[in-house]
Structures are given as C-alpha cells and as structure tokens.
Amino acid sequence: MQIICVNDGSTDSSAQILQRYAEKNSRIEIINKTNGGLSSARNAAYLYIKGKYTLFVDSDDYLEYDTCLKTVTKAEQSNADIVMFFWSTEFELNSKTLVHLKQMQKYDLNDTKCKISVLCFGDIWNKLWKSDFLINNELFCPEYLNYEAHYPVWKGFILANRIAIVNESLYRYRVRKESIMNRAFS
C-alpha cells in the first residue's frame, strides 16, 4: 500500500503533522506544493502513483476500516476498471455536534432506476480506480472549478470496460462550515 499525501500549500501545521506520520510509516509519501486547489492537488499525485489501484480521500473525510480490502477484492474478482461504493455523510452543526446520515447504500441493484441513480455518482472519491486506466486515459480533474470531479468520472464511465459496485457505505463524507463547497455558495 502506498499513501500519497498532498500538502497543497497549507499555512497551518499540516506539513509537520504529515511529516510525523511519514516518519512512523514508510508507506506515506508527502508531496509539498504551492497552493493550487483541490484539483491541482489531486492531479499532482498522479505522477507518484505506483500501485495497481488508486483511491482518493479528501482531507476532511475518512474511510471505513476495510474499504481498501473490500474494493480491491471486488476489483480483482470482477476485473473492473472502476469499483464504486456508497458513502455516509456527517454534517457539522457546530464545533461540538455532528449529525451522521447513512445514505446511498443497500440499493436493489437489479432495479433499473437504481442503476441509473448509481451511475450518477459524479464524485471521484467514492470509487476505486485501476491506476493504469486512470493515468492512460488522462482522467485528470479540471482546475479551479466546483464539481471538478465530474469530468474524469463521466469520461471514466464512458471508457471503462467494466464497472463494479460494492453495495456498502465505505466512505465518510464530512460537511463542515469551512469546506470548499460551503464557501463556494456563501
């Protein structure tokens, strides 16, 4: 396992925190770069990918403990270019209160409407990507756009030979007052 952490010009103590973790775990690689935004940070990591599969995690989100195991197992069993999975959302109401919503999981994947709904997932982070597929098809995120991941995701859907689904909530998407999306619409 390779863990690529992109420090996108942070002005807080993120660089030092990443360095402490990297000293404890040799699988962690740190990329320090000038601030360019979320897409720029994701795209910078592509040059360092060595593994067979790639999974993106935004800095304020986290994965369930067995996400990598379950998605890689599904990818190996199905020979999928993309393995999709569901997520849960945590809303920050104030500095001490989180509301956890389980959503987008346990669909009846034999239902046609469900299949259309599932394929509408426009986020890059709720998918495991075959690294060669991701890089060879230049599935980069356009920079300085909201919903930047829609372009590589839809291009990936069009080009993929096979897409598999793990019918579980494996990603925790955290909505905070200071998040990019909340700042974009305020």
Image (cartoon, helix red, strand yellow):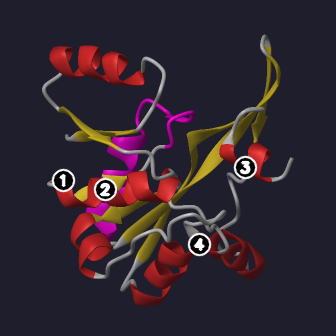
N-terminal label among 1 and 3: 1
Quick check: is 69 in the magenta stretch? yes
- At numbered mark 1, what does the secondary structure look like: helix, strand or loop? helix
Residue annotated with mark 1: 48
* Label 4 vs label 3, nearer the camera: 3
Whether the residues at callouts 4 and 2 have beta carbons within 8 Å, the answer is no
Label ID, residue 44 = 2
Q: Residue at x 67, y 45 (%)?
A: 180
N-terminal label among 4 and 2: 2
* Amino acid type at image mark 3: Met
Rendering coords of residue 157 (x, y %): 49, 81
Residue annotated with mark 3: 181
N-terminal label among 2 and 3: 2
Rendering coords of residue 145 (x, y %): 62, 66
Quick check: is 47 in the magenta stretch? no
* Amino acid type at image mark 2: Ala
- Above or below residue 20? Residue 141 is below
N-terminal label among 4 and 1: 1
Q: Residue at x 48, y 21 (%)?
A: 12
- Above or below residue 156? Residue 66 is above
Residue 138 makes an appearance in the image: yes
- Few, some or many C-alpha atoms within 10 Å of disc 4 (few <14, some 14-19, many ≥20)? some
